[in-house]
Image (tube, rainbow, N blue to C red):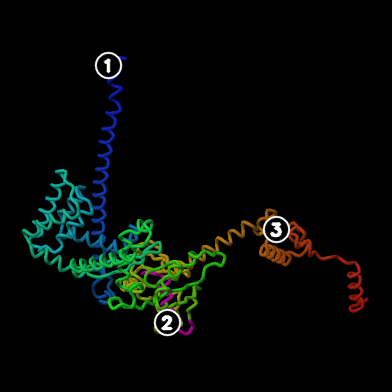
Amino acid sequence: MDGSSRGTAGDSPASATPASLTDLTAAAREGWAAENRAAARRLIACYELYRECARQEEAGAGDGSPPGHAVVDPFVAATGYVVAAMAISSLRAEAMISFAWDLHTRYPAILEALSAGRMDLRAAESLARQMATVDAEVLPLVQRKVVDDYLDALEAGERLGAKTMRERADAIIARHDADGIRRRRDEAARARGVRLNKGRDGMSTLSAVLANEEAAVLAEAIDQRVAEHADDDEGAAAGEECFYSKAERRADALLSLACGDRRRAGTPDQPPAPLRPRVTVLAGRSDSDDRGDAATVEFTRSGQAALHALLAMLATSDGASFERVDPRIGAADDARRALRYKPSAELARRIRLRDGTCRHPGCAVPADDCDVDHVRPFDHADPARGGHTEECNLMCLCRRHHRFKTFSDWVYDLQPDGTLIVTSPEGTTTMTRPSGPLGAYRREQAHAETAAWDAQQRRSPDPSTAGSRSHSEPTYWSRRAARLAAERDRTAHPAGTGPGSPRPSEHGRWWRRNAPVASKVEQDVRALLDELLDPPPF
């Protein structure tokens, strides 16, 4: 083999690897740029959709226009169309439309970079947020400098983190409008608060937005309590310590600060805290499921938890407030109260337990913060004509979507199981299902009943349709169904008149055991009685 052949064979693996990496890197960058351009197109479409809704609202103004309280906000209408088109939440759709409006009216330089594929959506949102309070007179100059600084850094190969990107933008803003940064921080202070969100897998999320000094004090208190707990647990086994993370210790310390600590209860610095959780009980689980963690309970504020978790809480509390709810549909309906506009407290509570959130497609406002609205409007002039205050005609809607449903042309149809079908004026149909604990419980029960029925049919099919393929040992219900089917067949087709005239013994063993016995003596006696009681006329 000559040297040229050896060189070609030896260089082929090395030359193929860089070429493939180069192609893949170029494809990744092109995909990144295409994603940025697609984001820009979505935002442009959202902006045009909002403008069209605003134009339609303005076109309806005039002599025949509805009163002011019945005018639908174009922003809410556009949000509904975006949710139906993109299958996203209302909160995300609102943020998208607001950002699209800001890009077109305040930040055209950011929209230009996004449309060219040179800036990603996250960076565009971050830079726009930094310039939100810049004075309008200097905003064109500031945004151009901020965008150029960011793009120049990217072209130079620098990859800016979120913190660095914000700091560089603030440095430019401070040179032209120092008060803009102060105004932005004043507005950020209004977001201060603590929020509790129902999570999944038995966990919930507790989020807090605090001032820096407040967060520092709270962090110091939590870490101090963590250290105190560590001193108390010095005798714990080393194997347990390695699985007890710092985050878990902080969670225990936060509960200790808020709810007290039994190990320190009664001391001057730690008085016992009265705890009384509220628990919603829908119904028990199947008796056949004897696992301790199978039964679940519902906490009003946070969501489901295992039974052993409730028992552990009750062991450290002063008791609990249990609310028992009958899960049957319409269990809280009252014929007399159905003719009143305001639902009873029990019925309103059931609707909120069923729905969980606002029922408008994409909206996630908690049901406790929503109105209980009539799907079919309540007839105040004559309540008996329709729109009754019953479970099948009530749903949760936040105040914004309550007004939207009342004064828009969208059609709402509530099914008996709580499924809501919403149809927009142009015909787009969306559907939402109740997400509350009562709605989830009903779905589980319906699924269990369907599964049980399917299993029963697989064991013993209907003899009237399965023919000879039925199980050799049918159950009581299949035998009863066969008997009833045979009786209906005899009624419809007397003996010898039906199609094929099947003998009763062909239906199953029950017929063979209970077949009528022909008696010649009985027939002779009946004939004699007929002759004596009703002799012939001749």
Residue 70 in the image, given as x and y percentages of width and height = 29, 75
Residue 344: image tag? 2
Tell me the CA gap for discs 2 and 1: 95 Å
- Residue 56 visible to an observer of this rendering: no
The residue shown at (57%, 62%) is 452
Q: Amino acid at mark 2?
A: Ser
Residue 473: image tag? 3
Per the rendered image, the range of residues in magenta is 334-358
Closer to the camera in the image, 91 or 234? 234
Q: Quadrant of the C terminus?
A: bottom right
Tell me the CA gap for discs 3 and 1: 84 Å
Provide the residue designation for mark 1. Answer: 3
Left or right? Give the position of 441 relative to 258: right
Q: Secondary structure at mark 2?
A: loop
Residue 461 in the image, given as x and y percentages of width and height = 64, 58
The residue shown at (17%, 58%) is 128
Which residue is at the far front? 235
Tell me which numbered mark, 2 or 1, is placed earlier along the sequence.
1
* Residue 425 vertical placement versus 161 (above, below): below
Left or right? Give the position of 346 relative to 4: right
Tell me which numbered mark, 3 or 1, is placed earlier along the sequence.
1
Q: Amino acid at mark 1?
A: Gly
Residue 77 in the image, given as x and y percentages of width and height = 29, 66
Q: Quadrant of residue 428?
A: bottom left
* Residue 11 vertical placement versus 234 (above, below): above
Q: Secondary structure at mark 3?
A: loop
The reply to whether dot 2 and dot 1 touch (C-beta < 8 Å) is no
- Residue 161 visible to an observer of this rendering: yes
